[in-house]
Amino acid sequence: MPTITFSPDDLQKLVGQKLDEKKMTYLMDCAKAEIDAKLTNEITVKFNDTNQPYLWSPEGLARLFKNILGKQKGIPAIKVQKSQDKVIYDKRLTKIRPHIACFKATGKKIDEYLLKQLIQLQEKLAENFGRKRQKISIGVYPLKNITFPVNCKAASPDEKFTPLDFHQPASLRQTLEKHPKGKEYGHLIKNESVYPVFVDAKKSIMSLIPIINSEQTGRLKVGDDSLFFDTTGTDEESVDLVANIFAYALAERGFTIQSLTIEYSGKKVVTPSLENKKIKFNEKEIAKVLGIELKTNEVKTLLNKMGYDYQTGTVTIPSYRNDIMHQVDIIEDIGIAYGYDNFQPLPLTSYTRGATFPSQQLADTQRNLWIGLGYQEIMSAVLSNKELLYDKMSVQDFGTIQIENHISQTYSCVRTWILPILLDLLSKNKHIDYPQRVFEQGPVTIQEKEPRDEQHLAAVSTHSTATFTELRQAVETTLRNSNIAYSIEEYELDCFIPGRAAKIIINKKMAGFIGEFHPAILEKFGLHTPTAGCEINLGALK
Amino acid sequence: MDIKKLAQSLHTYERRVLPELARHPYLEDLAAATGLQEVEAMRALQWLENKKAVTVETEPKELIVLDKNGQEYLKSGLPEKRFLKALQEKEIPLSKLAEKTKLTREEVNICVGLLRQKGAILLLQDKELKVKITDQGNRLLKSELPEEKFLKQNFPLITTELNPEQKHTLEQLRRRKQIIKVEVKRIKKAKLTDVGKQLISLGVRDEKFVDTITPQILRTGEWKNKTFRRYDVTINVPQISGGKKQPYRAFQDWVRTKFVSLGFNEMNGPLVETEFWNMDSLYMPQFHSARDIHDAYYIAEPKYGKLDDKLVKRVQAAHEHGGNTGSTGWKYQFDAERTHRHVLRTQGTACSARMLASKDLKIPGKYFGITRVFRHDVIDATHLPDFNQTEGIIVEEGLTFRHLVGLLKMFAKEFADTEEIRIVPGYFPFTEPSAELYAKHPQLGWIELGGAGIFRPEVVTPLLGKNISVCAWGLGIDRIGMFKLGLKDIRDLFSHDLSFLRNTPVI
C-alpha cells in the first residue's frame, strides 16, 4: 500500500483552513487513508485503495478535502496555456514505450520541501501505480537547459551520456549495467536492440527511459522555477492519467501549465489532455445499493462533494481519476459523502438455517471422544517439511505438495500426515510430566493426480509402559462409540516395530493405522520412553 | 482443629512415629525404631510438623561410620591381633608373613611397625629376617585393644559425644586405611510439642483406625467397628493433567457455535487453490500487487489445476472489458493459463467465491467459514505463515448497505460485546461499497474488528449468472481470541509447549 509523507501545515494551507484532529480523521477516512505516523511537522499517510493515485500527494488530498468541505464544487478547473513547442516521437519505440505525454510548468520557484514532494509523487506514481516503471515512468527536468523540439527517440545502446550522480559519460548499455537505477530497472529494456531516450534539439540526451535522467540536463535543483515533465508507458490511459495528475498538482502549487504537442507519425496529440469523462448514471441504483432515497439535487450535492460534476443522468469524472469501472464505484462515493455514520442499520430478517460443515460435525465427535480418553488436543501449522514427514520417520514420500517459493525449509510443503508432527512435539516436552497423551485433528493434503485434502486425526501416547495395545484400545473405543464397524489387520510401516502395527479397515478400505514406534525412530526424535500412535482418515468414517 | 479431630486425622506413619519420638529424636533412629523407611518416617515428621505436633530441627553433625576395612576387621579381627596369633606358635620369616596371616603386604608392614613400637615383636636376623613374638606381645594378644573396643560400638557415632580416650583412638584409626569415615551430615532431630504430647496421651496406637479403604475391608465389613482416618483436605495435592481441547480451537468452536446460532451455514474449500478461485473470481486483476510472488505460496508441482472453462471465460470477460456486468473491466489481457496456477489459499474469501458458484447455494443464504490460509511472511510475534480467517457472505435479493451496517453492529455485539462501533470507508478489490469496522471492546479499547462490503457485480454476475446483493465480510476475531486466552504472541496459537497447553484455561 502506498504511503506518503508531508507537512500537515502545508496540507492545511492548500485546503485553506485549519483541520482539527477529528476533522482530519474524518477527511482521511473519506480518502480511505489513515495516518500511519505523526511527527511535529510531518505526517505519514497510508492509502488502502491502490487505485486512487490522484490522492497520493498533499495537493491531491487537499483537492478532495476542499470538495468535501464545500470549498469548491465538483471538478476544479485549471488554466493551461498552449505552447507552440513540440515533442517528436520516434515510431521505432512503438514496441517499447508506445505512449508519451509531456508538458511545461513555469513561474514558481522550487524550495526544498516542494522538491521533495515532487520526487515523492513521481516515485509513488511510477513505483506503485506504474508497477515499478513497467507500465509508466516519469521524468522531471529543469526547463532552462532544454532546447525544443525535444525528441523521444530510439538510441543505440552505445550512445553516451552522463547519468545522474556519474562524473563521466557512460554508454546507455553501461548505464544499465553500472548505475544503481540501471541495475534495478534495466530488465525493462535490456533485451531491446534500441533504447528509448529523450534528446533535445542540441542532441543532448536528457534521459534514458525508464531508467535515469542525465546529469547535465536532468538534475532538478532548489531554486529552479520552470520544469519539463514527461511520462512514458505501455498503457495510453495510464500515461494520460499520470500527466493529468501531475499537471493538477503543479497548477495547484502555482505553476502555469503549458501544454506540448506530441508528434507521432501520422497523428498529433496535445498533452496534458485534462479530458473529463462522462458516464451515464441511473439514480435508481443508489437506493438499490445504499438503501437510501435521494432527490436529484441531493445526488448532485453529494457527487460535487466527492469531486464529480453532475447533470441529471450524467456524471462527469475528473481527468485525474480512472478508478471508476462501474456505477457502483460512483455510488460508493455518494455513500461516503452521505457519511457512513448516517446510515440507519436494517436488521436481517430472512430465515436461514445454520449448520456446521458436515465433516466438522464428525471431526468434533471424534475430538470429544479422544479428549474423554485423556488426550490433550494440540493444533499445529499445516506447513511442514519433508525431512520431518519422511526422513525422520523412515517412510517413503506418499505424494507431497511442495511450495516453489518457500521462505524457510521448515515450512516448505503441506503436511501429508500428522504423526511426525506429534513426535516432534513430544521431543520438545521431555521435561514435562508423563504420561503424555496428545492428539491433533486437522487437514492434510495428499498429491495423487490432483491435490486432495483429507481430515485426519492422529494421537500418540508416551510413557514408561505405552504399547500398541493401549492405542488400539483407544482407537476401538472411539470407533465403537461412533457406531462404526471396523476390523483390524496386520500392517507394516517402517516407523513401527515389525509385528506391532495394524491397519484399521472400514467399509473394506484402509481408514488408518496404529503402531508402536520403532526405537530407531524414537532415537531420531531423542525420545526415551516407549511411544505408540495412530492416524485415522476421518473421511473414511462416514 | 480440636485435638480429637487431629488425632483422628493421623496417618499410620504418624501413629507409629509419635510414641517413639521421645526416645528416638533422630530421624535415623526413629526409622529403625518404628520399622519405617527413612523417607516414610520423614514424611510422618513433616505431617506432624504441619499439625504442630513436633518441631523438626536440622543439625549438621560429624558422623563416624565404619568404612570397608573397619567392617571387615569387626568380623575377622584387627590385623595386629591376627598377626600376633600367627606368631604364637613360632617365629616366621618376614617374607612368608603375608601368606601365613592372610593379610595384605601393606597390612603386614603396618603391623610390623605398630607392634614393634609397642614392643610386642622382635625382628631376628637369621638366614633371613624372622619375626618373633615377645611376652608383651602375648599379653596384648589376650587383652582387648582400645581400637577393638572402638569398632564394637554402635555406629554412627557423633564426634562431639566421644570421651578423650575414644577421641585418641579415633585419631589412631583415622591414620589407617579405610577403617573409619567421618562424614558431615545434616541430621534431622524432632522434638514433641505440647500438642504432640497430648496426642500421645490420647492413645495414638489405636488399631481401630481405617486408613485406606480396601475392597477387602468393604467385603468383610471390617470397617464397622472402626473409625476412618480424617484427611487434611486443605493440604496441596500433586497436579494431574487430563484431556482437553486446545485453547485456540476451543475459541474457534465458540465462534462456530455463535455463527450457527445466528443462522449461518459453514462453508469450506481446498487448501491448494487455483489463482482463479483465490483471486481472479474475486475480480483481483492479475497485475494486482497482492498477487506478487512475495505474497502467495506457489505450488511447485502440479503447477496447474482444473477449472470449468465456461466459468473462466465469464470471469475473463469481466476482467478484460466487464463482460455483461456493466463494468469497463480492468482493461488488460487476461492470462487464462495463469488463472489455473496452483497457490496455497491466501484468503478465505476464495470459499465465498466457490459458494457463490455452487449449485448448493441457497438464496436467501448466510454462510461463514473458519478457514486456514497462508501468507508469504517471515514468522514473528504478529505473523504466521499459516493462520485462520473467519469470513462469509449473505446472499439475498434487496440487501443494501444499511443491512450491512446492521450486520456489522450485530457482529460487534456478538463477538466483541459492544454496541459502540465505527464504520469507515474501506477498500477491497471485490467489494463496492467497502467498509472497515471498528469496535470499542470493553477491555481492548477501539480495535479493527473486520472489513465488509457488497460484492461487486464483476464478482457476482460471472459466478452466479445474475447480479443480486451479496454482503461479504471478514472478521479479525483472532485478536479477541488471543485476548481471551491472554496471549501476546501469535505463535502461541500453535504452541507445542505441553505445559502451556495443559495449563491454559479453555474458554
Image (cartoon, rainbow, N blue to C red):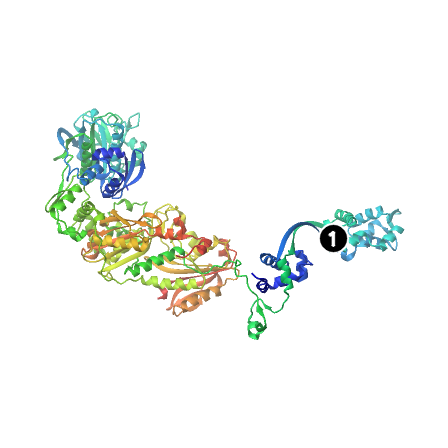
Given the image, on which type of amino acid does mark 1 rest?
Asn
On the question of residue A428 being in view, the answer is: yes
Residue found at the very far bottom of the displayed protein: B220
Residue A195 appears anywhere in the view = no
Left or right? Give the position of B171 relative to A293. Answer: right
Viewer-proximal residue, A277 or B288? A277
Mark 1, residue position: B69
B381 vs B85: above or below: above
Circle 1 crowding by C-alpha within 10 Å: few under 14, some 14–19, many from 20:
some
Q: Position of residue B473 (x, y in %)?
A: 27, 53
Numbered label tally:
1
State the quadrant of the N terminus of chain A.
top left
Q: Nearer the viewer, residue B406 or B48?
A: B48
Above/below status of A218 relative to B252: above
Please provide percent x and percent y for residue B424.
25, 47
- Against B233, is A11 above or below? above
Residue drawn at the location 33% of the way across and 60% of the way down: B257
Q: Chain of mark 1?
A: B
Residue B143 in percent (x, y) is at 84, 54
In terms of image quadrants, where is residue B74? bottom right
Residue B256's quadrant in the figure? bottom left
Direction from residue B125 to residue B284 in the image, left or right? left
Which secondary structure, mark 1?
helix
Q: In the rendered view of the protein, which quadrant contains the C terminus of chain A?
A: bottom left
